[in-house]
Image: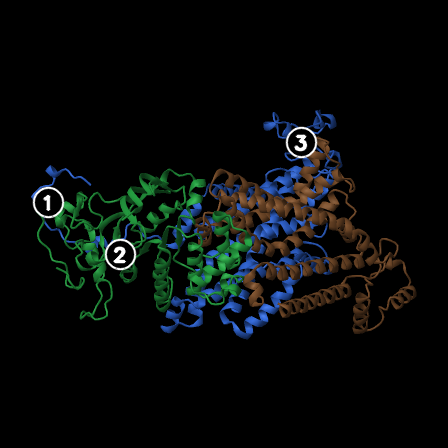
Amino acid sequence: MANDNDTITQGLFEPVGADTQVSEHISGKVVSAWRDAFRRFVTNKGAVISMIILALIIILALLGPHINKYGTNDQNLLWSDLPPKISALSWMPMFSGKENGVDVYKDRGVKQEFWFGTDQLGRDLWNRTWAGTQISLLIALIAALVDFLIGVAYGGISGYFGGTVDNILQRIIEVISGIPNLVWIILLILIMQPGLLAITIAILATNWIAMARIVRGEMLKLKNQEFVLASRTLGAGDGRIIFRHLIPNSLGMIIVNTMFSIPAAIFFEAFLSFIGLGIRDPQASLGSLINTGFTILQIHPSQTIFPGIVISLLLICFNIVGNGLRDAFDPKLRR
Amino acid sequence: MDKLLEVQNLNIQFDIFGTHVQAVRGVDLELNVGETLAVVGESGSGKSVTSKAIMGLNPSPPGKVTAGKILFEGQDLVQYSQKQMQKIRGKEISMIFQDPMTALNPTMKIGKQIMEGLIKHQNMSKAEAKKRAIELLSLVGIPNPDKRVDEYPHQFSGGMRQRVVIAIALACNPKILIADEPTTALDVTIQAQILDLMRDIQKKTGTAIILITHDLGVVANLAQRVAVMYGGKIIETGTIDEIFYQPKHPYTWGLLSSMPKLHAKIDKLLAIPGTPPDLSDPPKGCPFAPRCPYAMKVCLDHMPSYTHISETQKTACWLLDERAPKVDPPKTVGVGGK
Amino acid sequence: MGRYILKRIWYMIITFYVVITLTFLSMKLLPGTPFQNANRLTPLQLNTLKHYYGLDQPIAVQYVKYLWNFIHGDLGTSFQFGNTPVIQMLVAQFPVSMDLGTEAMIIGTVLGILLGIFAGLYRGSFRDWGTMIFATLGISIPSFVFAGALQYCLGVLVQLFPVAGWGTPSTHVLPVTSLAVGILAEVAIFMRTEMVEVINQDYIVTAQAKGLSRGAVVFKHAVRNAMIPVVTILGPMTAAIITGSIVIEGIFGIPGIGKQFVSSITTNDYPMIMGTTELYSGLFIITILIVDILYGVIDPRIRVSGGRS
């Protein structure tokens, strides 16, 4: 610790005193939890890219069926089983309109272009793929709403009021969740006839369980914490405590869980349509398109590829966004 | 007195998220055979990092020793490989931790956790190791050791668990025992028992102890020598009498003033205002200067060198420079404050 | 512990009772009659048939009879396979599905645990990222898309494995892989989280401070503790295997319960659907029971205190 004695002059030995204001100063800006979460989410490249892909898929699903001249259910047997063709991209083997080196369009004298090809009935698969995506997105919306409306309310009531109410609600959940989702859904769908309505009701009946459990756990944890007690001591009623304290504090977890239940619901719809319990012809769903494509996978693989890619992208992106949100809201879990 | 351990100019840096936190900056320590050295300081002062460095337990990355030596019986532990350190840990130097509730593996029987070290370092058979484990449990004052050796941590109370942690540390008769805040997480009544136990064990086994703490009460109970750390540096060191009765550094004064005393006439505890320095951008001068009521201009830009008060006491403070104004320690410090 | 197990078994029985009651009720609520070609039958014939199957009796009587038959293993007869008893079909097909399911489960769990340990130990590194990207894809891509891609690439384009069938070991490769990937990914992500959690615990430092080797610290202390909670995802995993096997058996033409199930749905073979549903529920409920008991056995904290609430 040798100091250069020359530079240390007598004048430096003047007391300066400690400035407590300076020493107590907290460096760094104060950032609210929400802003902080947003900042973390935005720095997550994977999640941002997934968001962009999801936005693109949503736009395509909404606009896709309207930007060409074919109808979703227009059949034309002259146009059956055509491979994809996009003139602008014809240098890519995928979109050249050729199959096994043969230009099918030329052979059959088809002048039109089908971007994703056509199915056995000559229906345009571009339209049908995006129509199917609409169904998946609708299911996503329904699943999110069910989570928010039923799951949060059920879990919130159960956790907040506790006691007998909680006991009864929990026994009900225990029985419902003791039976696999698949069984509930199959029973419901058999009674109701397969279709979008049946799937919606099936989601309504089962999709909120996980959310209810999580919200109940959060409520149980939060309602005994000091800040809630403090608020109650100051005369806050149930409503104020629930809406000002409990819900804002568990909202992060609710959002994250919703994001994870969306891909699960999308998968379930596709799965049901795939095995013939969901959306049925002539309506299109990604699952049923893949199922139809499978029967001729070895001859016309292109009919399976596009719906397969879209559903995989949807699920991958929703999962990555979910992960991103979880990391953003709970940095502890990321490590 | 034989030097068992000598830490020379130790520097440790943690590279976290692009910043370089200099947790330890040029620390010198000595430990003699059979003695107890207390390292005192508030959280973030670098005391735990120093003690973990002796064991080679700082996670790396992000932590690394950037300079200095840790000489154990003349061998520099900084240069040791992980393999070599494994032969030192638990055998020559062992450690007990702050929180006994989390320091034990919840799914492994107590006995097995003690036996692991014995089997590894002393080539004992399982039966021998178990016998020794039972002996150790009774040494640390656990009743029915032959029964409890087969129980799990959750079947023990906090104080009992800390005894088990001590038994694990003592298993191979280490030459040095590092106790990192051994009583902080315990009830006050249990604290006294654990300190008594440690003193007892030191008497029986002659183990040297490095006691890491922020609690001067614990220090008074157990230590012969004290090193006071602040901002990654040792700012004062001396025998226990010197530190308690003739402290020279304003930070030590602050620490002593903030210690509750039974018979004191003052009706409030004095806190040291301010917060410890940010070690990712350490101050050029004395780290305590921004909080020091006696700070001078020189303190802000120049780190004071050590002034040797006696053979055993040295202090790094500009107040001890002859050019500095004379300052008396506050009346709240010690009984014999000059 | 004994009381706890009894309580769980009691819950299991109640849940299963709810399941069979629900299947009975949905049978009653099904649109149309349960008889094929009902419109070609005369009312008299229909009544004779109804009488024969006891369908003209009050619901309550039918219900009791249904329960009675169920207890005796009589699940009715299949419509599509010339009145073969449902139970006989299920018993014949169960071993195939069981093989497929257990093979996928064992491979998926073992590899998933290893990958999870690997990613957890190197968290934040390139290896961790790679593993997690792989796992996210494994979780996200639907089993039927993945199975189709695998079948097309390795079965049709490069004829490495048979496209369909079930018998020789090489026929197992594609379906078991398709089914195992999702499980592997799920287990890997779960195990990694647990591993990261455990590795930051104080007792890991204690173990290091004893002078144990890195291997001993990782395997004796970290992995063991991290693996305990993995048991809890065994339940959802069974459900995933059931769902997965339904599509994968169909895609690869495996003569198991899943394939049968799909064809029962397309032919409206209600007794078969109900029988399969009950079998699936039974499997799921038993797995949950096993998980609960297993968790108590391997976690000493629960073992002694006598179970969770």
Image chain in green: B
What residue would you read off at disc 3? A112
Q: Is residue B67 left or right of residue A159?
A: left
Amino acid tagged 3: Gln
Q: Nearer the viewer, mark 3 or mark 1?
A: 1
- Identify the hue of chain C: brown
Cα gap from disc 3 to disc 1, whole angstroms: 90 Å
Residue C69 quadrant: bottom right
In the depicted view, which residue is nearer to us: B125 or B60?
B125
Q: Is residue A171 left or right of residue B58?
A: right
What residue would you read off at disc 1? A12
Contact between marks 3 and 1 (CB within 8 A): the answer is no
> Disc 1 is attached to a residue of which chain?
A
Q: Nearer the viewer, mark 3 or mark 2?
A: 2
What residue would you read off at disc 2? B224
* Chain-order first, disc 3 or disc 1: 1
Q: Residue B79's spot in the image, x, y percent?
A: 37, 37
Q: Is residue B154 left or right of residue B304?
A: right
Amino acid tagged 2: Gln
Q: Is any atom of residue B18 visible in this view?
A: no
Tag 3 secondary structure: loop
